Amino acid sequence: MLSPCCASAHGIVGKADLPIPVWLFSWTAAVVLVVSFVALSTLWRWPQLQERHARRLLSLPRRLEPLANLAGLALFALVLYSGFAGAQEVDANLAPTFIYVVFWVGFPIAGVLLGDVFPLFSPWRTSARLIRRLLRALAPGRWSQPPLRYPDRLGMWPAAIVLTGFGWLELVYLYRDVPATLAALASGYFAFSLTGMVLFGVERWERHADGFAVYFGLLARLAPVCYRDGEIRVRRPLSGLTGMPIEPGTLAVIFTVIGTTTFDGLSNGGYWKELALLCEEGLDRLGVGQNASIELVYTAGLLGCILLVGGVYRLGIRGVGTVAPECSRTGLARTFAHTLVPIGFAYVLAHYFSFVLWQGQAMAALISDPLGNGANLFGTAGSRIDYRIVSYAAIWYVQVAALLAGHVGGLALAHDRALTIFPDPEEAVRSQYWMLAVMVAFTSFGLWLLSAVGT
């Protein structure tokens, strides 16, 4: 039993104590994808996911939403208070662990299992709805509609920028663990989102400019359940993605999700650290300064990984375009965008699984002593993290399984969509050879990132 560690420590683990060589894992993964592709092309002869067959499971109690809204506001207030007024040590303050573990990692995982639950707890959404309700009561004619119209051309680009910014905070900024800094940034984002929702409309802003709501909602489309009109409905796995609206910036959001996680894994490996050190020394000799050099190099690495993910996908789309020359590359890129979402979640789960498993245990102590001042509100302040709860080999197996499942899901979505574009099933299969290559590339690179940590 050990004490809590740094909340922003990376969750990815290396190849310690693996029962078989890493290269064998990589080859096996590639074979699994190829076999899955052959099975899909042979047995999956008509579209099965394009229509969402959601059926009612049960109705939600009317009091559930306001209670969740209140809980979200209370937790947000506690995080802010802890960050500003509590001890400024990362392992003693609630704010870093809550933001990096519960918020950043917990909500995506919960969304894939339970559906999009974040809107129920979003503090800025709840506050904006209350403010708009108050404004409508005071001036019904003026505030019956949002005073400003959200520009269609912006699409989801604001959300992509927000996610890139949070990735930069998590992976690049040297003072990312200071509780007061995190609380100040959270306050600024609250004010930003609240203003946007009041001026442009809560739902409109939430679907396009609230980076976290867009991200959590995107992955929640993988869930077997969804919420609609106060009901919980069940649907076919993956079918929630086929009706996903593709707007300007949607692909950028997906590239950012995969690219940020990719760089998180890459930056933990010895190869990157050696390259980064050389670049930092060069910048330092130019008089840039040590801290600025580190942040510049890591910023370049983060943006480079996002661009790399986009480039690999675009290459696959170019290949698909050789089978369908009558289709524009832009149109094809938008048509198959949803196939990357399972890969995005696979990278997130593979990367952060050990992080949530271990650092999530720290919440038991922190919730009793959120300020780090020796309190013991719920009698759990003495709880410690047990790093022996699962072996490194078991974590590796989970990570590999997550990567394979995500890429097989991406293949299934791509094949199902191809069947709607190409009337001839054989032509649909030929169009997916390039997408298979993309999936194999992403899988192999993901496995290499997992195995390269610490080398």
Image: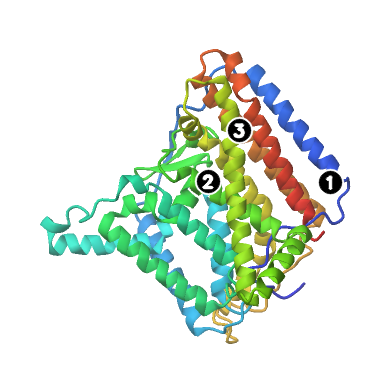
SS class, disc 1 = helix
Left of 87 or right of it: where is 58?
left
User: Going from the N terminus, do you reach mark 2 or mark 3 first?
Assistant: 2
Residue 380 appears in the rendering: no
The image quadrant where one finds the N terminus is bottom right
- Residue 445 image position (x, y, % from top left): 72, 45
Q: Amino acid at mark 3?
A: Gly
N-terminal label among 2 and 1: 1
Q: Dividing the picture into quarters, in which one does residue 55 lie? A: top left
Name the element at disc 2: helix
Name the residue that disc number 1 marks.
22
Q: Closer to the camera: disc 3 or disc 1? A: 3
Q: Is residue 177 left or right of residue 389?
A: left
Q: Is residue 134 visible?
A: yes
Q: Secondary structure at mark 3?
A: helix
Q: Which mark is residue 254?
A: 2
Rounded to the nearest angstrom, the CA distance separating label 2 from label 3 is: 15 Å
Nearer mark to the viewer, of 2 and 3: 3
Amino acid type for the residue under numbered disc 2: Ile
CA–CA distance in space, label 2 to label 1: 28 Å
Q: Residue at x 52, y 57 (%)?
A: 164
